[in-house]
Image (tube, rainbow, N blue to C red):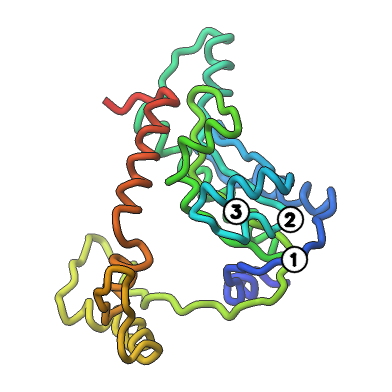
Amino acid sequence: MDLFDILEKRASVRSFRDDPLTGEQVATLLHAAERAPTAGNLQDYSIVLVTCLDLKAKLAELCWKQPFIKKAPLFMIFNIDQHRSSLWIERSGGRKVFDGPTGFARSFMDIGIASENVVLAAESLGLGSVYIAIVAGAARSIRQLLGYPPLVVPVLGLCVGWPDKRPQPKPRLPLRAIVHRDRYQDFSGEEIDRIYGARESAWKQANPQGLTLPDGRIVKSLSQWTTLGHYGGDIVAQWDEEFVEAIREAGFRFE
């Protein structure tokens, strides 16, 4: 399949068949990950492959009860990992320099590139996938569950498997929203309305009376639903606290 065909048709899959992946398919996905660009050629990340049903069920519970984590035959957890390279540096007489904010950020970038390679490879094999960003919000609990050593923090999950059904790709914002030339070009209120107008209109068409939140409030826009409903209450603050505590417990320097 042509690369641009894959890019155009890819959509997040949240319904998987029970069929397992073959060893060869998993090897292909991992080869795609390891061939990804990596800062300094250090590959300061790791991937935990989870296929055990009981363990996937526990991870699904930790990750906001998302059932497709348990359903997908393969759940991949991508970790910022300075542990392995710190052992190498120590044994070889180097100096520990990557356990601070820039090393953390570099590993984070490596994970994004490697995981996207896996997504594209999965699509080329006829498989589907969905990112699980909330892994970062459950980072401390996952570290304890999976027995992580110092300087290893989970930041991203990826469910991979055979799609039970393939959803249509979701629309994206216009390029003006994300592309700036030579310098940052800020947005007027009217531009913001144009950029997000199609999404807001589609939401209002689907929910003409708005939606009622558990506390009785009615939300009447996509932005309200996103920040007060879907990510409402104190849930994001809880995720932030969990992630920051996981970083601290793992021993990264963020003073």
- The image shows residue 13 at horizontal and vertical percentages of 62, 68
As measured in the structure, the alpha-carbon distance from the residue carrying label 1 to the one carrying label 2 is 8 Å
Residues at circles 1 and 2 in contact by the CB criterion of under 8 Å: yes
As measured in the structure, the alpha-carbon distance from the residue carrying label 3 to the one carrying label 1 is 13 Å
First-in-chain label (2 vs 3)? 2
Foreground of the two, 38 or 128: 128
Q: Amino acid at mark 2?
A: Pro
Q: Is residue 86 visible?
A: yes
First-in-chain label (1 vs 2)? 2
- Mark seen at residue 162: 1
- Name the residue: 53% across, 11% down: 90
Foreground of the two, 192 or 15: 15
- The image shows residue 175 at horizontal and vertical percentages of 36, 74
The nearer-to-camera label among 1 and 2 is 2
Horizontal side, residue 216 vs residue 56: left or right: left
- Mark seen at residue 73: 2
Q: Is residue 103 shown above or below 251?
A: below
The residue carrying pointer 2 sits among few (fewer than 14), some (14 to 19) or many (20 or more) residues within 10 Å by Cα, namely many
- Mark seen at residue 106: none
As measured in the structure, the alpha-carbon distance from the residue carrying label 2 to the one carrying label 3 is 11 Å
| Element on which disc 2 rests | loop
The residue carrying pointer 1 sits among few (fewer than 14), some (14 to 19) or many (20 or more) residues within 10 Å by Cα, namely many
- The image shows residue 181 at horizontal and vertical percentages of 28, 65
| Residue wearing tag 3 | 158
